[in-house]
């Protein structure tokens, strides 16, 4: 039976994550003037939010909590909140709504 060293996996993941974040900073030193590249980089946070949000909608135990979190995410993103704030508040809303639903079902 092969043995797996978890520390090696963590080290490789940390290295890849570090390189993905540091390489653009070290390779691109001047201002980006290409309109297509600037447009692409502008929409990256929104695409990231969509990639995190849409699959997670089906992961909840209730479509109601998913719908409420989705609406909250859309509104927060629309008013310009950060990706972290949108993700955290959406997750918190799912947690709270599902707690309320569970409480109402048991009483």
Image: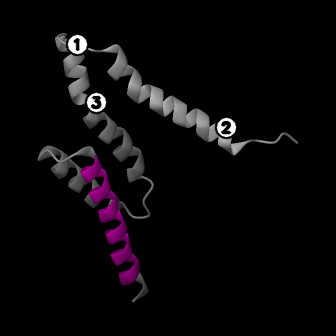
Which quadrant of the figure has residue 6?
Answer: top right
Up-down relation of residue 106 to residue 66 (above or below):
below
The residue lying toward the viewer, choosing from 65 and 30, is 30
Residue 89 located within the stretch drawn in magenta:
yes
Q: Secondary structure at mark 1?
A: loop
Tell me the chief SS of the magenta region.
Answer: helix
Residue bearing the label numbered 2 = 8
Circle count: 3
Residue found 25% across the figure and 24% down from its top: 41
Q: Is 4 situated left or right of 83 in this image?
A: right
Residue 74 in picture, x, y percent from top left: 20, 48
Q: CA distance from mark 2 to mark 1?
A: 36 Å
Labels 3, 1: front one: 1
Q: Is 75 situated left or right of 67 in this image?
A: left
Packing grade of label 3 (10 A; few <14, some 14-19, many >=20) is: few
Which quadrant of the figure has residue 49?
Answer: top left
Q: Which residues are magenta?
A: 84-104
Residue found 41% across the figure and 77% down from its top: 102
Q: Residue 89 shows which numbered tag?
A: none
Q: Quadrant of the N terminus?
A: top right
The residue lying toward the viewer, choosing from 76 and 102, is 76
Residue bearing the label numbered 1 = 30
Which quadrant of the figure has residue 107?
Answer: bottom left
Residue bearing the label numbered 3 = 44
In the rendered image, the residue lying farthest to the top is: 34
Residue found 26% across the figure and 60% down from its top: 68
Residue 97 located within the stretch drawn in magenta:
yes
Q: Secondary structure at mark 3?
A: helix
Q: Secondary structure at mark 2?
A: helix
Q: CA distance from mark 2 to mark 3?
A: 30 Å
Q: Are marks 2 and 1 in contact (CB under 8 Å)?
A: no
């Amino acid at each position: 039976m092969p043995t797996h060293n978890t520390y090696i996996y963590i080290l490789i993941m940390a290295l890849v994550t570090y390189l993905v974040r540091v390489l653009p900073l070290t390779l691109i030193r001047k201002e980006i003037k290409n309109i297509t590249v600037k447009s692409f980089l502008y929409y990256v946070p929104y695409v990231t939010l969509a990639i995190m949000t849409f699959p997670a909608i089906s992961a909840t135990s209730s479509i109601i909590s998913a719908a409420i979190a989705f609406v909250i995410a859309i509104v927060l993103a629309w008013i310009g909140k950060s990706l972290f704030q949108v993700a955290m508040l959406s997750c918190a809303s799912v947690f709270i709504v599902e707690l309320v639903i569970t409480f109402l079902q048991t009483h």
